[in-house]
Amino acid sequence: CAPKSPLMATSKPSLKSLLRKGDLLVAPGVFDGISTRLAEQVGFQALYMTGFGTVGSHLGVPDAGLASYRDMVERVRTLSALTSVPLICDGDTGFGGLLNVDHTVKGYEAAGAAAIQLEDQEFPKKCGHTPNRKVVPFEQAVAKIRVAAEARSSPDFLIIARTDARTA
């Protein structure tokens, strides 16, 4: 089977349409071109671009806020172009304040993500697997999600809110 062109435009089902079916949807973590292609070849209907794996494979360092927006949005663009299924992408904290969240959501959507996951940690963030993480106040987390929802251009682009409040 010849690999498809990394820049080939494909019509992807929306993540929203897959979720509406009500079936279990498993989205394995992918972090580079090979893992993305393998996961799709195995038959997964959606993929999740993991921040930890993506930062580790790209920069060779832990996911501790060292990857920039530019680093991550380029990974979104690359991995999205390699798959014909929806790609859910880790957007960390949105890379700063509310203006950054707006910019991040618009960039990830334009790069081909089907959804962005945003977390409520303080910036700069720590890896979700490490202790002593700090979260922003609830009102700030809610404001971030509101800004994210308003920033998207399509209602099919989903916003996923993740909290570290239970383990911080």
Image (cartoon, rainbow, N blue to C red):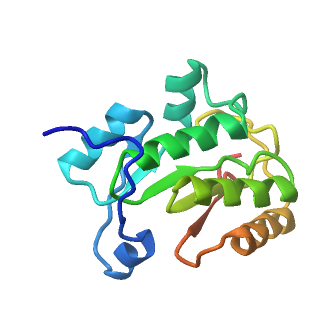
Point out the image quarter for the N terminus.
Answer: top left
Residue at (74% x, 40% y) in the render: 133
Is 20 above or below relative to 121? below
**Left or right position of 168 against 8:** right
The quadrant where residue 55 appears: top right
Viewer-proximal residue among 123 and 87: 87
Report the front residue among 2 and 80.
Answer: 2
Residue found at x 40% / y 40%: 30
Q: Position of residue 138 (x, y in %)?
A: 81, 65
Q: Is residue 1 left or right of residue 117?
A: left
Residue in view at x 40 percent, y 43 percent: 29
From the viewer's side, name the closer residue of 47 and 77: 77
Q: Indicate the position of residue 10 as horizontal and vertical percent values.
A: 35, 59
- Can see residue 119? no
Q: Quadrant of residue 65?
A: top right
Q: Is residue 40 visible?
A: yes
Front residue of 129/66: it is 66
Task: Give the percent coordinates (x, y) of residue 125.
Answer: 75, 39
Q: Residue furthest left?
A: 1
Query: Does residue 113 appear left or right of residue 167 in this picture?
Result: left
Please count the marks in the image.
Answer: 0
Q: Which residue lies furthest to the top in this view?
A: 60
